[in-house]
Image: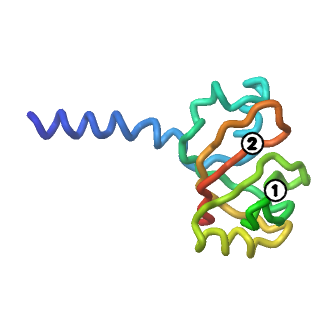
Amino acid sequence: MKHTALIALTLGLLAPLAAHAAQDLPTLYQAYEEAGYSTLSMEELNQTVTFTAVALGVSSNLQGEPLIEAGDGQGNVLARLTTDDAQQAAKLGALEEGAAFTASCTLQFSSGTDYLSFGDCAIK
């Protein structure tokens, strides 16, 4: 009986994570628009989200770390991606503009911007 309860509890805790499985970036961005350009009310806030996107710009932030502008196939910038991991930073920096990719990132707080902010990104 204890094992059944433990399994049910574990599955219940993992269910919200499964809800954030692979999505496409335009779908996440639409939810951001519907939330009034704020991630504060989005259930994905501070959660790891896996999504597909297109690299539209590759530059670096003020710390010299790679900063990826990601978007859809029509060239619309929908998000900015960063990472603190050196190995993943190399992968982000190696992305070529126009390349499609899949990433798992943490949705960070954004408000009043035209793009979503993602950190702790890992390219798949």
Which is nearer the eye, 77 or 5?
A: 77
Residue at 73% of width from left, 47% of height from top? 25
Kind of residue indicated by mark 2: Leu
* Quarter of the view holding residue 42: top right
Residue at 54% of width from left, 47% of height from top? 48
Kindly state the secondary structure of the residue where label 2 is placed: strand
Check disc 2 and report the residue beneath it. Answer: 116
Kind of residue indicated by mark 1: Glu
Spatial separation of the CA atoms under disc 2 and disc 1: 10 Å
Check disc 1 and report the residue beneath it. Answer: 69
Which is nearer the eye, 14 or 67?
A: 67
- Position above or below: 116 against 86: above
Q: Position of residue 36 (x, y in %)?
A: 78, 24
Residue at 77% of width from left, 48% of height from top? 79
Kindly state the secondary structure of the residue where label 1 is placed: strand
Number of residues whose C-alpha sits closer than 10 Å to that of mark 2, classed few (under 14), some (14–19) or many (20 or more):
many
Farthest-out residue, left = 1
**Quick check: 29 left or right of 114?**
left
